[in-house]
Amino acid sequence: MNVHESEKIAGGLANLGFQPVDSREDADIIVFNTCCIRDSAEKKIHGHIGELKNYKKNNSDLIVAIVGCMTQQSGATESLKEKYPFIDIILGTANVHLIADKISEIINAQSSKRLKIYENVSPTLALHETQPPLRNSYPNAWINIMYGCDNHCTYCIVPYVRGGERSRDPDSILNEASALLADGYKEITLLGQNVNSYSHSGWNFARLLSTIAELPYKFRLRFMTSHPKDFSSEIIDVIFAKHNICKCIHLPVQAGSNSILKAMNRRYTRESYFDTIQKIRSRLVSCAITTDIMVGFPGETDDDFNDTLDLVQRVRFSNAFTFVYSPRKGTPAAQMVQLPASLKRERIMKLIEVQNQIVKEISDSYLGNTYEVLVDGVSGEILTGKTETGRVVNFIGAKELLGEFVNVHIDKCKASALGGHIDC
Ligand code: SF4
């Protein structure tokens, strides 16, 4: 989602006549679009901002802007101003779409002293639809269908920094999708914190998904992220009925223990999660299911962790984003008694070992078969693409195949990607 927001920021700057450059040394404007979902991301961004002090010393015209959800946390703007007085612009998640206007204000300011703009408004105020993005990911394109989240999982800061759920008008989404497909894009990914709860003027997610899938072009349709409590049979029926909706579903489970799911306020149980998986697999036989899993949540016992391992082994996720819980200031879980770091490390290593073995076994099952691959990357004579199930495939081919669907016979299988050759 942040990558797509960065495309919108780049779109605003392009409207002002600026172009992307490869290195910070050549930049007139540097914008950091921040994320505070994980502690590690926040620490990293502080390192990057700190490095800019010297750039500013060498180029006093350089404009530095910090935007996005890190700035939306309580007290964050004041702390950034104090720590990095060379920052020119701070905008939150709701007014980031004003970045181009704010940069113009600074450039056009008559004062000999550099104008500083630090503005944060309530995250529920904006839909960010005003900014045409500078897309950088052909043949894939992202479309936001909604913003914010109403779920309040106890570990998550998103509802505080991005506000409650707001769904976009379906007409505007359909227009955006049609325009992208007419421009030659071949894959559309619908984005939202919880796309399953999309709701606007009588439209639900299943209807939106089905209507976009019917647009008269050859393309793939994906979506993320889904919340297991809202993943309905109606959505499964739509995926089954439309050949171009990828049979690849990201369904974050987070934990396999009912007591931890309850403490996380996830509002489903391991049994109801298994039930959803069973419904998906009975209708969409070859569907890849991916997930997010967290270990070391406060109160997680050995038995809770073993429940997570058991769930992973039973579901057999095609891929899993595994991470260690880290407290986010302002969330309920940050007030709970935390587990020792050594125990969290031990558990994440075990989880990764189990999941890696599953990924290897699933990858091996691709060997000897042919799959349709959408080519989305070119490096010399090596092409990269993805199967419908989201597996990365590398193979030799002409660069003109970028954006084309080709059949690839899989003859190699590595941890990170499959290898193959074009099957004529
Ligand atoms: S559903 Fe996702 S975005 Fe919303 S609070 Fe839970 S983890 Fe955060």
Image (cartoon, grey):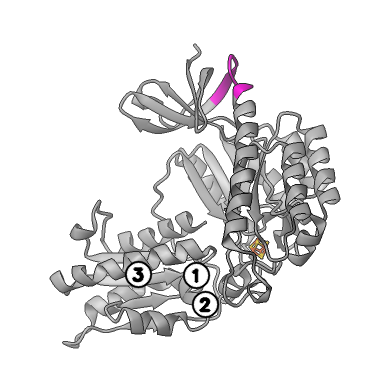
Residue 100, numbered circle:
3
Q: Position of residue 368 (x, y in %)?
A: 58, 14
Which image quadrant is residue 25 in?
A: bottom left
Assign a secondary structure to mark 1. Answer: helix
**In the rendered image of this protein, does residue 419 appear above or below residue 312?**
above
* Disc 1 and disc 2 in contact, CB within 8 angstroms: yes
Of the two numbered discs 3 and 2 on the same chain, state the one appearing first in sequence: 2
Q: Which residue position is annotated with label 1?
A: 69
The residue beneath circle 2 is 73
Q: Quadrant of residue 220?
A: top right
> Circle 3 sits in a helix, a strand or a loop, which is it?
helix
Magenta stretch holds residue 379: no
Q: CA distance from mark 3 to mark 2?
A: 23 Å
Nearest to the eye among marks 3 and 1: give it.
Answer: 1
Q: Is residue 368 magenta?
A: yes
Picture coordinates of residue 198 (x, y %)? 70, 59
Viewer-side label of 3, 2: 2
Work out whether residue 132 can be spotted: no
Give the residue type at disc 2: Gln
In the rendered structure, which segment of residues is drawn in magenta?
364-372
